[in-house]
Structures are given as structure tokens and as C-alpha cells.
Image (cartoon, coloured by chain):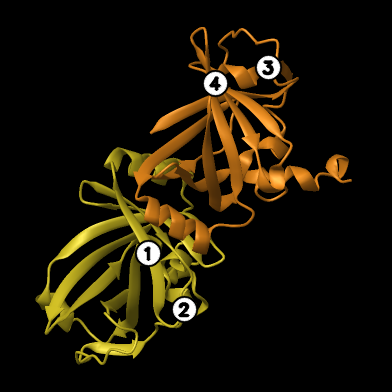
Chain colours: A orange, B yellow
Amino acid sequence: MGIEIERKFLVKDDRWRSLGVGILYCQGYISSEKGRTVRVRIIGNQGYLTIKGPVSSRVRSEFEYVIPVEDAKEMLETLCDRPFIEKKRHKISLGDLIWEVDEFFGDNQGLILAEVELKDPNQMIEIPDWIAEEVSHDARYFNSNLAKNPYSQWEENKT
Amino acid sequence: MGIEIERKFLVKDDRWRSLGVGILYCQGYISSEKGRTVRVRIIGNQGYLTIKGPVSSRVRSEFEYVIPVEDAKEMLETLCDRPFIEKKRHKISLGDLIWEVDEFFGDNQGLILAEVELKDPNQMIEIPDWIAEEVSHDARYFNSNLAKNPYSQWEENKT
């Protein structure tokens, strides 16, 4: 079992782009109820099955297993809700932290989120100057919710 | 990915008891919605995580992964609905079939179900004479439903 402790932010501009390369992620949810999520993810040619518990004070239990990519493809096709979450994840190492900047596509096109994983929920961190407001506690930005109510459908983003 | 094709029956009497030994199973459900179930199971000192799709004409997709028993215990404790399913599974080999007789305990005490896994949904099988009526299509007998509405709470079983 792992523990996930993370903070999540919007970004101000494109300065993060020069700091890391992006890798494509495709993921879907078999279930996301009562704060528990069951996620199927494909990164490159590897599948992952991940169970997460409810979020409590930035901390969340996480159980992740590597699975055959064929299983992941079949579960995405036949068992996961639509739309899938499609994003390019850019890993950026700054000091002793790794920032993950997720650039979303598909139904969440236009959204960019920066996450940083912490060792301790109260760890002090240096915030890069391309980071904008924190959205850690805004449930709309949970990936499992972006799969149900994607960014392009938010009232303020409708054209 | 696997395909599960099975038929499920009640039993008439105890004749099956002399035909196989029983092993304890404890399992719980992280999710069981829209016909998809996410099950955590412990058999002996091994954990399993199993995803199943909706049942269609006796056939069901099934993805099963071996996981550390510590993960399984922690998921049962912290993420699974109560009550758990506790049962002793007796594997009985008859001809080229393997019958699994599940003797339930806890909130499902009193229930005994015999399952047989088939290679083909229309496979002809020989039914042992200790088998009673078929309940393959009675959703109350799905293990995921026995975890929500256990046998001891069924109207006809209340004393």
C-alpha cells in the first residue's frame, strides 16, 4: 500500500514547457463512488490498475498494480465510463520536488494542472513562479470528476 | 483477460461434503455498480483483486490479479463495504467438471451454493443428484449482492 499526499495548482503561463518532456497518459474509471476510485491507466505500452481511497487532509491511500496493457485496453473499452482522461504529463524536477504538469486533451482540452507529491501533509514547499492558484480542495479538478464533468463542459468554459 | 461462464445451483442435502475439502475465503467489494464489480479476496495467505464485467447469457469478463495479502487486508478493512463474504469453498472434481460448493458463514450463514464453470455457455453437463434448483439467473445469489443483502436478512429467512 502507498500513501498519496499531494497538492494541486493551476498554472499562470507556459514557462513550465521548457522544463520537462511530456508522456501521454490515457485513463478511465471503472468506479468512483464514496470517495473510492478504481482507475485503469495506460502509459506507453504498460497498463496499471489503481485503487484509491477517500481524500482526507491531502492524504489518500493508494494501491497500484502493473497489469498487461491488453487487459488495460480491454477494461478501458468495455468497463470504463466515457470520456477517458487523455493528458500529457510533464515531469519537472525542481530542488528535491518533482512537479507533474498535466496538459489535458479531448473533453478536458484547455486545462493544465500542476501537481506536487509531498512526503508529509504539512511539508513546506517552494512554489515556482509559473504556478497560479491552488485547487487541491476543489473536487472539480479530481481526475475522476473530470471524467464525469469534463472541463469543456464547465459553465464558465462554454462558448 | 478471462471469460467466466458459470451456472449456479442450490443443493438438496449434504452428500457433497464427503467429496472434497474446504478452504476458507474472505472477500469484500470496493464497488458493484452498473454490473461491474471490483472484488478483494483473501484465500489462505494470498490476496486477489478481481474486476468483473456485466453478466450476459451466463458469460462475464473477468480480470484477476494476485496482490500482496497485506494490501488485500488493508483494502478489506478500509475500502470494502460490510458485511464481507465469508465462505468455505469445497472443490469437487466430477468427470471433466469441477464443482465448487460454497458454504457461507457470517451474515450469509445457512446458504450453500454449488457453481460449475463451463467452457461454452451452451455446454451440456451432467447434474449430480445432490444438486437442487438452478439459480444462475437469480441476482440475489450473486456474491456482490449477498454482501449488500445477505441471506439471513431475506424475508423468508427471518425468524
Disc 1: CA contacts within 10 A as few (<14), some (14-19) or many (>=20): some
Under mark 2, the amino acid is Ser
Q: Quadrant of the N terminus of chain B?
A: bottom left
- The amino acid at mark 3 is Arg
Other residues around mark 2 within 10 Å, as few (<14) / some (14–19) / many (≥20) = few
Residue at (33, 57) in percent of width and height: B64
Residue A21: x and y, percent? 53, 25
How many C-alpha atoms fall within 10 Å of the one at disc 3: few (<14), some, or many (≥20)? Answer: few
**Along the line of sight, the residue nearer the viewer: B114 or B6:** B6
Q: Which residue is mark 3?
A: A15
Residue contact at pointers 4 and 1, CB within 8 angstroms: no
What label does residue B62 carry, if any? 1
- Tags 4 and 2 both on a single chain: no
Subunit ID for the residue under disc 2: B
- The amino acid beneath tag 1 is Glu
Label 1–label 3 contact, CB within 8 A: no
Quick check: marks 2 and 1 in contact, CB under 8 Å? no
Residue B112 left/right relative to A90: left
Q: Around disc 4, counting alpha carbons within 10 Å, would you say few (fewer than 14), some (14 to 19), or many (20 or more)? A: some
Question: Is residue A131 or residue B143 the one in the foreground?
Answer: A131
Res. B111 visible in picture? no
Q: Can you identify the residue that label 2 sits on?
A: B56
Question: Disc 4 marks which residue?
Answer: A20
Identify the residue at horizontal 60%, vertical 46% (top origin): A85
- As measured in the structure, the alpha-carbon distance from the residue carrying label 4 to the one carrying label 2 is 46 Å
Q: Give the structural element (helix, strand or loop) at label 4.
A: loop
Disc 3/disc 2 C-alpha distance (Å)? 51 Å
Chain of the residue where label 3 is placed in the rendered structure: A
